Image (cartoon, helix red, strand yellow):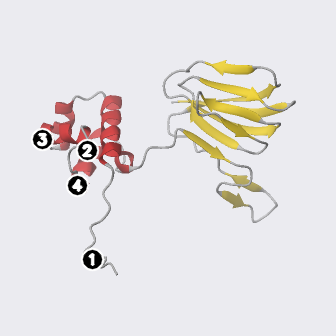
Amino acid sequence: MTDDATTPPARLPLDWIAAALRRERTRAGLSLSELAKRAGIAKSTLSQLEAASGNPGMETLWALGVALGVPFSALVEPPAPAVQVIRAGEGPAVHSEQSSYLATLLSASPPGARRDIYRVRLEPGSVRASDAHIPGTMEHLVVSAGRVLAGPRGEEEELAPGDYMAFRGDVPHSYEALAPGTAFVLIMQHV
C-alpha cells in the first residue's frame, strides 16, 4: 500500500512547458533577456526551461505567464491532438429544459479567431488535395451525408454522417468522397 503523503506528485512533462514557452515568447516578440527581465528570473533559468532541462516551480511559471500575458494553463496544458474526431452521438451534449433541443459542443472559438463556413458536396472518383493555408488555420468539418476520408496527409480519417473532425489546415491535407452524395459543413478558422 502506498502512502500518498510520501509519494511525490507527478511532474509535468518538461517538453510541453518548453514548447509552450518558446511559442508564447515568439508570439509576444520577446527575446530571452527581455522575457527573463519582465518575469524577474535569470536568463539562464529561462534558457534551461526552453531547452526542457530546467525544473520550474509554480511561481516561476506564474511569473512567466504574467510577463507573456497568458494564463498559467497556457504554459502547462498538454498539446492538443493534431487531429480531433468526435463521432456521431459523442461529445459534450446539453439538453434544453423547454424542448427536445439537444446541442453538442464540437469546438469553441478561441479569442480573436475568424471563421469561414462552407457547405461542401463531393462525389467519389477524385481527391481534393489542398496545400497548406495561412499559418494558424484550423479546419473543422461535420459530415451530413455519405462518407469522406479527410485530414492532413498521412493522418486521414474516415468519417460518416454526424461525425466531427478538427485538424490543422496549415499543412497539406485532402478530402475524398467514399460514397455518392457526400456532403459536409467545413469551417475554416483563422487566428
Disc 4: CA contacts within 10 A as few (<14), some (14-19) or many (>=20): few
Q: Which residue is mark 2?
A: 64
Helix or strand or loop: what does disc 4 sit on?
loop
Q: Which residue is mark 4?
A: 57
Q: Position of residue 126 (x, y in %)?
A: 77, 19
Mark-to-mark CA distance, 3 and 2:
11 Å
Q: Which residue is mark 3?
A: 42
At label 2, which amino acid type do we have?
Answer: Leu
Q: Position of residue 135 (x, y in %)?
A: 48, 24
Q: Residue at x 48, y 43 (%)?
A: 80
Numbered badge on residue 140: none
Numbered badge on residue 5: 1
Q: Residue at x 59, y 43 (%)?
A: 84
At label 3, which amino acid type do we have?
Answer: Ala
At label 4, which amino acid type do we have?
Answer: Gly
Disc 1: CA contacts within 10 A as few (<14), some (14-19) or many (>=20): few
Question: Residue 58 falls in which quadrant of the image?
Answer: bottom left
Q: Residue at x 27, y 51 (%)?
A: 62
Q: Position of residue 163 (x, y in %)?
A: 72, 44
